[in-house]
Each structure stands twice: as C-alpha cells, then as structure tokens.
Image: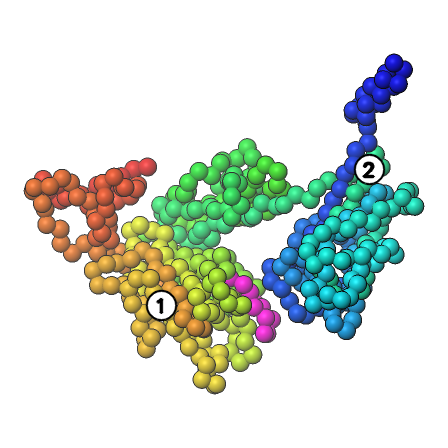
Amino acid sequence: MKRILLSYIIAALACLPGAAAERSFSIVFGASTAGTTSLTNENFVANAVREGAGYIDRVTSVVNVFPETDGIKLSSSKKNGKFNIHLAEDAQVVASRIVVSAKRYDNDKDAEANIMLNSETLMVPSLDWAEYTLAIPSRPEKTLTNLIVDAECRLYIESITIYYDDAQGTVEPELETVETPVISPAGGSVTAGTHVEIRCATTGADIYYTIDGSDPSTGSLLYEGPISINNDLLLKAFATKEGMKPSALTSAAFTVRTPAASLESTFDFSQPTSLTPAIAEPAQKESVDLDGRSFSEGDVVVSFKASESGNTHVRLYHSYDAGIDLRLYDGDAMVVRTMNPGFHIKEIRFTMSLSGASTGSGDLNLIPSTGSFDWASETWTPEEGYPEQSVELTSAMQSRIASMTVVLDRSSGLHEILPDHDHEAVYYNIMGRRISAQTLAPGLYIKVAGGETKKVLVRP
C-alpha cells in the first residue's frame, strides 16, 4: 500500500507546473538549388540554413561543405568537410543530447563514414536518412556554445537538433515573418478614382492600412478590397497572421493630377533611381532581381515575373559596356496595364539596350498575349478594334531594354452599336467588348436594350 501511495505522489509531482520538461530546437540545412562550390564562413547561413538561423551567432572553419536542396554535403573525394557553428546566446543551453539526421554518400559503399561532433564520434552506416544521437551524460552542467562538425568520408546532414531540460533555460521557437505587402500601383501621380490594390504573398494574412500618414496597427483599417484614390495621401500598410511575426511596414505616396495630364508614361530602366519606387544603381557587373516587383508611372503599372525554368531571371543589370538595362530571359514576362478604367493602351514603344551590340548580341524579342509586337520598330500595338487595358509580353530567348514608353488613349473603342429589338439587354465595357449581365463588376458600361443605347454606371 505504501508503494502504491508513493507512486501516486511521484506522478502528481511530475504534473506540477514547475516540473521540468524536455525541450528542443533544430537547425535545418538546405538550399533552393544544389551547388558544387564549397560554402564559406560568410555565406554558410544565407545559402545553407533553411530553418533555425536565429539560433546561430556565426559560422567558422567551413571547409568542403556544399549546399544541397535537402541538406548539406560534407567532404569531397580527396578532403574531409567540417564547420563550426557558434550558437547565439539564447541557444546556449545545458544539452542532454544532440540528434543528427544524416546519411552516407552512395558512392562510398566500402567506406566507414562518421561525424566528429563536439569531439565525439557518430558512425553513419546507412545510405538512407537516419537519426544519430550523441548523449551527453558525462558533462551534465556544461553549457553548449558550439556545434563542431568534422566528417570523415562523404556524407549528408539534414539537421541538428538540441535537446535540453527547460528547468535550466528556454529557447523560444523561431517564428517565420509574414511577407511584406505590395502596394500596386506603388505610388506617384495618378488620376482621381484610381484603384490601388494591396497584396500579401503569405496566405491567410490580414492587411491593415492607414491613409493619414500614421503607422498602422491591428486597430487600423482592415484591407478588404481595392482603395479608390481621390486625394493626395500617404498609404501605409503591414500584414499579420497568427503564429507568425508581423510583416515589415510598406508605404506609397500618391498625388492626384488633373484629367488633362499626359497620357504617356516612360520607364527609364537605365536610370533605376528615376523609377517608382526608386532602385539604387547596382555596381558594374552586378544586378537587381525584379521577379515579383512592380513600378508605376502615371496611370500605368508594369510588373515582372520570372520563368519557372532557367538559371537567370528578369533583372536590372549593370553591364561593362553600356550601363544599366532591363534583361528578360527566355520565358520571363512583363505585364503592362493601366489602372484607370477610362483608358486603354494605344501602343508601347521600346528602346533596345546597346549592351552587347558590338558583338552582335543586342536583341529584343517579345511575344505578346494579345495584339502584335513589331520587331523592326520595337513597338507593341493592340489588335484593331480590340483595345486592351493590359498586355503580357513574354521574352523569347533574351531581351535587353533600356526604356519603354506606354501611350494611353481615352477613346472607348466602341465604333458602332446596333440596337437589337428582339433580345434582352446587352452590355459592353468601354473597350467595346460584350460582357455578361451576370458578371458585371463595378464600372462604366454601354447598355443596349429595346432599341435604346445608353451609358450606365454599376456601383459597388
């Protein structure tokens, strides 16, 4: 009876709030693409740590360590691989054990692969991923400050997990950060009534914004749809999601111009500081990645998206012979659109970069989603009778662009509408395209019914 009672007491004590529990944190390795060039002390974290970078203060002694998509590879056929992770202060704990997820290189079938971790040896016999544990019973009070790894023969490491008793300290899990929202158009001079959109790449995130110049909080306006700009204002926004860190703050300043403003918008990619938003000039032979980025000028927005294939994608590049230009590679695309429903795109004129012209490699090859691109004049125009408010231009091979000018037209594109007395109402948008009555979005339309033709405004 006494033994039974003692068992209950021990179990109850274990459930008390102050009872110690095992905790852990992990450093997970991996890169977006595998590489054959050994990592360095400086780029190890950025190029090879997929999760847990916050637990690392710095990395030293990196030799023969290569990035893989599912981990890192240590050693080559001639030399051992090694590295030393100096843990951040909050990650320095009294560890009870260290678990390494690793596997042997498949070509070293006759070799005995092993890892020297903090002066202890872990054998890695399997060609498949497996976990190998380094127990630390001999030094129970020693604070772990480094993870010193030295591999004999070639092998892969996927992760290193540190286990410890939370009675001696805690390490909070590293939270991911919500992506910074993107405002489109990104500010500048716009026509009254221009609709501004705010998007966040993090699925399920809530976007909050202000239009009075103050920094937004979760008590500010919740973004639920496009914002109509009718006055000069400074738009600020950020995004939140439960279980993640809030995004960085983003902002865009808008000025409303008169309807008589110019209908031409020029984007000078050779002068990146003139773009909206401005970009610092890259150094010679350096570049700025443009995938997912947008620029606005007047009522026009141009955005870029990279191809799913290829190693090099759309960017601003500072060449050695002709300054800075926009480069789209095979399959990269730019989308040009007007944010004002009263305008359509009349033409887009391009100026080809002179980079590479001396070697005969200067080119400009764009395939439009609609309309036609004339290679000789370097100009896009819409199909006659079908004005467009947006067009996607995809590069065939490589296109080098110094600048582009987008010309807008106020005309509706409606040449003639003949009333139909025998049918129900028919609707056309201001571009002259027929729209189903069931799918009418807010905007201006031409209604044809009962022998009568008139403009109608569909309100939100």
Q: Is residue 234 visible?
A: no
Identified at 10% across, 50% down, the residue is 418
Check disc 1 and report the residue beneath it. Answer: 367
Q: Secondary structure at mark 1?
A: strand
Horizontal and vertical percent position of residue 245: 63, 42
Q: CB under 8 Å between callouts 2 and 1? A: no
Locate the C terminus and report the quarter of the image it occupies. Answer: top left
Residue 373: image quadrant is bottom left
Q: In the shown orientation, is residue 116 left or right of residue 358? A: right
Locate the N terminus and report the quarter of the image it occupies. Answer: top right
Horizontal and vertical percent position of residue 457: 25, 40
Q: Mark 1 is on which residue type?
A: Ile
Q: Is residue 128 above or below residue 74?
A: above
Q: CA distance from mark 2 to mark 1?
A: 61 Å
Q: Mark 2 is on which residue type?
A: Asp
Q: Secondary structure at mark 2?
A: strand
Identified at 18% across, 54% down, the residue is 414
Q: Nearer the viewer, residue 296 or 65?
A: 65
Identified at 29% across, 57% down, the residue is 388
Q: Earlier in the sequence, mark 2 or mark 1?
A: 2
Q: Nearer the viewer, residue 42 or 24?
A: 24
Q: Nearer the viewer, residue 369 or 253?
A: 369
Foreground mark, 2 or 1, reads 2
Check disc 2: other Cα within 10 Å, few if <14, some if 14-19, many if 20+: some
Q: In the shown orientation, is residue 285 left or right of residue 9? A: left
Q: Can you tell which mark lies on residue 165?
A: 2
The span picked out in magenta is 281-290
Horizontal and vertical percent position of residue 154: 74, 65
